[in-house]
Image (tube, rainbow, N blue to C red):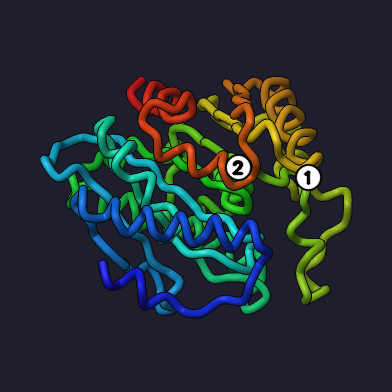
Amino acid sequence: MNNFKKLPAQSSINEKADAYGEVALETSEAAADTVRLGYDIPFGDDPAQAIDVYAPKEGGTGLPVLVFFHGGNFTHGFKEWCGFMAPAITAFPAILVSASYRLSPEVSFRDLLRDCFAAVKKAQEVAPDFGGDPDRLFVGGHSAGGQIAALLVQRDDWREEAGLPEDAIKGSFPMSANFARRLTDLETDTSLHVGPEVPDSPLELARSPLKRDIPVLVAWGGDEKPYVLEEGPQLVEALKASGVQAEAMVMEGADHFEAHLRTGDPDDPWTRRVREIMAG
């Protein structure tokens, strides 16, 4: 997988995040040889607007599809960070789609999230080419990608804009995310700001009932930053109060990065629970 070595340079995040990125990339490159891979399938003109599709080598039909979004605080990260999950996910059997998106501050957060809806739409379109069922789509993500995974089932306006039907996404698996962060408040273009009375964060949006009841598994490490430890349970309770099948999973002993790396283990409780939800 020499393609993995052609990734554009990014600045350092911090020591732990950089080390996680190196491990994730190395293990993803090794994992790519164990599956059938569709690499760099574009959904836009920018190189960052692309998905990787990991499917079982032995093939299959009608398989559920998990579209997963990388972290990096919306300013860093690559879809290649998530390929290490492929052996465990494809063994369900299922399809793993790892999606990239344009990053801040090069684009607005609105356009960044539109990229993510477009990535789901592209995954739906190409799923049958890899044995996937376009009507069995699930979304997930780590850190910033976890906030994306939550918003993907909350922002019906952008879902409709992307051409995705109301029942397109059958479940969501946000992990280790900041669910109270209002992305419009972070826009450098102040004309894109909205008032505090307009729900914008996953926590704010969760207090309004979703149009559909889907399973949402909210996971986080036991050794995360305080805001993650606080906001994960808050999101679960808010979703439950609005009638959603939400459940929490604490990955004991895991920090922010170990929580994601554990998802590559087929015997990890998170992986087993995701398999149950996607199968059922």
Camera-side residue of 102 and 5: 5
Counting labels gives 2
Residue 228 visible in this rendered orientation of the protein: yes
* The N terminus - image quarter: bottom left
Residue 155 visible in this rendered orientation of the protein: no
Nearest to N terminus: mark 1 or mark 2: 2
Q: Position of residue 100 (x, y in %)?
A: 46, 63
Which residue is under mark 1? 180
Q: CA distance from mark 1 to mark 2?
A: 11 Å
Q: Residue at x 12, y 41 (%)?
A: 59
Q: Residue at x 37, y 67 (%)?
A: 43
What type is the residue that disc 1 sits on? Ala
* The C terminus - image quarter: top left
Residue 32, above or below 89? below
Q: Is residue 107 left or right of residue 167?
A: right
Residue 89 is drawn in which quadrant? top left
Looking at the rendered structure, the secondary structure element under dot 2 is helix
Which residue is under mark 2? 150
Q: Residue at x 68, y 31 (%)?
A: 222
Q: Position of residue 272 (x, y in %)?
A: 41, 24
Q: Residue at x 34, y 53 (%)?
A: 123
